[in-house]
Image (tube, grey):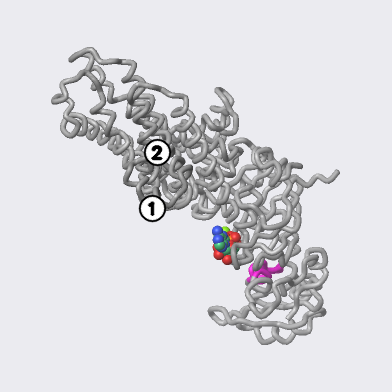
């Protein structure tokens, strides 16, 4: 038996003339935190709305914990927590009343209701605004109310559309830690525009562009598709810059060297590897033998933002690049 | 059932957190008072009965009920909470019926607050309280009919003003369909059964019948069927939102 808790096959959504989602298939296992990435209008929210059982797909199927969302929406929805884009909530209610309503709908009574609510409140740190109408809350607190609503029943499937949007850095950190802590026995999908969030919480990322999946893999796999994968950057003081330039170029496995002047004559050299091979060993070997004034040495795993741009921006490129790329990405960097 | 109860409670409380409930109740009591005592000539009639009070209800409801109904779905659409509501494990029918019943309970409460008028006639004379009870029942049923229409129409838009105006127009058509004004327009060219059907849809006709003190099965069936029909339309309209 597969242990996938979210199974999506051939999902399509058309609005009149627009095809917002053009055939998406993937599955999410227990313990996975899947990051949905993609430019504005890529179809992330539309996909999540279909998974949550709000929008009906034009084609395709969605199964949550074994329940078909189309045939058995109520059963699927009871297994799911959903934070819609913009975290809508009844503005005239206070968070306490609102969470009470959600708990009531989800079948919590008496003591169980109180404990479910207080646990959700504690986890999202809502105590101080519990009795203030939601419409008067700041954006970040509104988002946290939506978050509390989604996790109130400790659902096995959690779908969250931009959960950290509008949160302050402390709260972002808290929410990410919360997601990581909950991840063990859940299948979670979050969408985000913050790429460092993917590194911080996601065990896997999918990049969507114009309704199609253009990349799927662990954040490391995806970053490895960047030309910065296994590259090395050294900062060298003015006295040795010229000497370093000559020797760095000759390090074994270096394809090319980019340089950038920093302040006070310090030069930054970035060495790109041939065939994505790791360079750091050879570079440290060289540096160990020289007596240059080295102020910084950075070895990179790759840059997700660059991969994101590569996969999505260029209109000239066909939408689909390489679906199975995740597996081979670590072998071959996307050179050029 | 549990979900419906939760929706009902939320919606009912929702009326009271904004000034809407209080404004509505004050306007309702005020206008029933004005119509009863000034326009209806309650005292001039010199009879211990409440006909002067009830006879204006269809007209009052024409504007007041759409004002309660307009927010039911339009507001959820506007603020995006519809998405939240429909992704909670609540069957759509339960959400529709729960919200509707909350609005109806609210209207019923406003109606119940007119009891001082009832007390007044009982102090002043010896009214036929059976007729009065029947009239109250009829009035409540009629409010339910208007509300079902208003609720369904509210699901077609995210703009409460549009919901209000369209509801008033549709309710008006249902109200007057039994009047000669309307029937004359059809008579002469439309077949008799159609004219009968149109006439039988009239709120006024059915309410007047109940108001006289006779609770006829046919009138009850009429209101029950009318409410069921519009709630069904309401469910279909809400469900249609999910197509995108
Ligand atoms: N109800 C709708 N009717 C018509 N088109 C829609 C509707 N909802 C979404 N779309 C279109 O579908 C496409 C995908 O939208 P979606 O909201 O899924 O994007 P997204 O990836 O979530 O973008 P963002 O990063 O801006 O949130 C867009 O072109 C959008 O205009
Ligand atoms: Mg979105």
* Residue A306 visible in the current orientation: yes
Indicate the position of residue B67 as horizontal and vertical percent values.
Answer: 35, 42
Quadrant position of ligand 1: bottom right
Q: Chain of mark 2?
A: B
Residue contact between numbered discs 1 and 2, judged by CB atoms under 8 Å: no
Q: Quarter-wise, where is residue B27 in the image?
A: top left
Report the quarter where the N terminus of chain B lies: top right
Residue at the extreme front: B188
User: Sequence-wise, which precedes: disc 1 or disc 2?
Assistant: 1
Question: Disc count in the image?
Answer: 2
Marks 1 & 2 on one chain: yes
Q: Which mark is residue B202?
A: 2
Is B122 one of the magenta-colored residues? Answer: no
Residue density around tag 2, few if under 14, some if 14–19, many if 20 or more, within 10 Å: many
Is A298 one of the magenta-colored residues? Answer: yes
Secondary structure of the residue carrying tag 1 is helix
Report the quarter where the C terminus of chain B lies: bottom right
Seen from the viewer's position, the closer of residues A156 and A33 is: A156
Task: Tell me how far mark 1 sits from mark 2, CA to CA.
Answer: 24 Å
Q: Chain of mark 1?
A: B
Seen from the viewer's position, the closer of residues B65 and A325 is: B65
What residue does disc 1 label? B162
Indicate the position of residue A317 as horizontal and vertical percent values.
Answer: 69, 78
Magenta segment, which residues? A296-308
Residue shown at 61%/35% (left/top)? A153
Secondary structure of the residue carrying tag 2 is loop
Seen from the viewer's position, the closer of residues A13 and B137 is: B137
Tell whether circle 2 marks a residue whose Cβ is less than 8 angstroms from ligand 1: no
Tell me: A282 left or right of A228.
Answer: right
């Amino acid at each position: 038996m597969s242990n996938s808790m979210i199974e999506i096959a051939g999902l399509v959504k058309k609005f009149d003339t627009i095809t917002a989602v053009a055939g998406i298939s993937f599955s999410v296992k227990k313990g996975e935190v899947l990051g949905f990435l993609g430019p504005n209008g890529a179809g992330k929210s539309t996909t999540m709305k279909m998974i949550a059982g709000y929008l009906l797909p034009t084609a395709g199927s969605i199964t949550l914990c074994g329940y078909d969302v189309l045939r058995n929406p109520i059963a699927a929805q009871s297994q799911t927590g959903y934070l819609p884009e913009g975290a809508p909530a009844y503005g005239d209610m206070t968070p306490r009343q609102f969470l009470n309503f959600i708990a009531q709908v989800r079948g919590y009574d008496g003591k169980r209701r109180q404990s479910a609510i207080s646990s959700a409140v504690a986890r999202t740190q809502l105590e101080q605004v519990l009795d203030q109408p939601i419409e008067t809350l700041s954006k970040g607190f509104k988002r946290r109310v939506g978050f509390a609503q989604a996790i109130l029943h400790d659902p096995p499937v959690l779908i969250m559309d931009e959960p950290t949007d509008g949160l302050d850095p402390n709260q972002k950190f808290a929410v990410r830690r919360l997601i990581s802590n909950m991840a063990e026995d859940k299948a979670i999908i979050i969408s985000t525009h913050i790429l460092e969030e993917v590194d911080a919480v996601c065990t896997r990322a999918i990049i969507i562009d114009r309704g199609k999946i253009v990349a799927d893999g662990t954040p490391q796999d995806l970053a490895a598709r960047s030309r910065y994968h296994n590259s090395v950057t050294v900062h060298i003081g003015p006295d040795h810059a010229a000497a370093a330039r000559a020797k760095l170029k000759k390090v074994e496995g270096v394809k090319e060297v980019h340089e950038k002047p920093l302040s006070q004559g310090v030069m930054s050299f970035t060495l790109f590897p041939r065939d994505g091979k790791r360079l750091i060993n050879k570079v440290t070997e060289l540096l160990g033998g020289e007596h240059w004034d080295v102020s910084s040495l950075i070895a990179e795993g790759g840059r997700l933002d660059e991969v994101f741009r590569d996969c999505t921006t260029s209109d000239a490129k066909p939408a689909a690049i390489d679906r199975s790329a995740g597996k081979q990405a670590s072998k071959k960097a996307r050179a050029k | 059932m549990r979900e419906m109860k939760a929706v009902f409670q939320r919606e009912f409380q929702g009326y009271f957190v904004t000034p809407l409930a209080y404004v509505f109740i004050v306007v309702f009591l005020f206008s029933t008072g004005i119509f009863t005592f000034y326009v209806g000539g309650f005292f001039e009639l010199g009879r211990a009965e409440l006909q002067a009070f009830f006879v204006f209800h269809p007209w009052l409801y024409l504007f007041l009920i759409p004002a309660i109904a307009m927010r039911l779905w339009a507001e959820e659409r506007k603020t995006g909470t519809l998405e939240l509501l429909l992704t909670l494990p609540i069957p759509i029918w339960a959400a529709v019926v729960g919200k509707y019943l909350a609005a109806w309970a609210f209207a019923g409460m406003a109606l119940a607050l007119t009891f001082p008028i009832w007390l007044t006639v009982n102090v002043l004379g010896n009214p036929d309280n059976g007729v009065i009870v029947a009239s109250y029942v009829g009035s409540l049923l009629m409010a339910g009919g208007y509300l079902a229409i208003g609720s369904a129409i509210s699901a077609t838009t995210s703009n409460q003003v549009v919901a209000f105006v369209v509801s008033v127009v549709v309710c008006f058509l249902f109200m007057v369909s039994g009047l000669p004004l309307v029937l004359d327009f059809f008579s002469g060219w439309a077949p008799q059964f159609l004219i009968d059907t149109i006439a039988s849809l009239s709120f006024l006709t059915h309410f007047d019948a109940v108001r006289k003190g006779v609770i006829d099965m046919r009138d009850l069936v009429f209101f029950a069927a009318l409410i069921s029909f519009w709630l069904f339309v309401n469910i279909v309209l809400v469900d249609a939102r999910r197509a995108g």
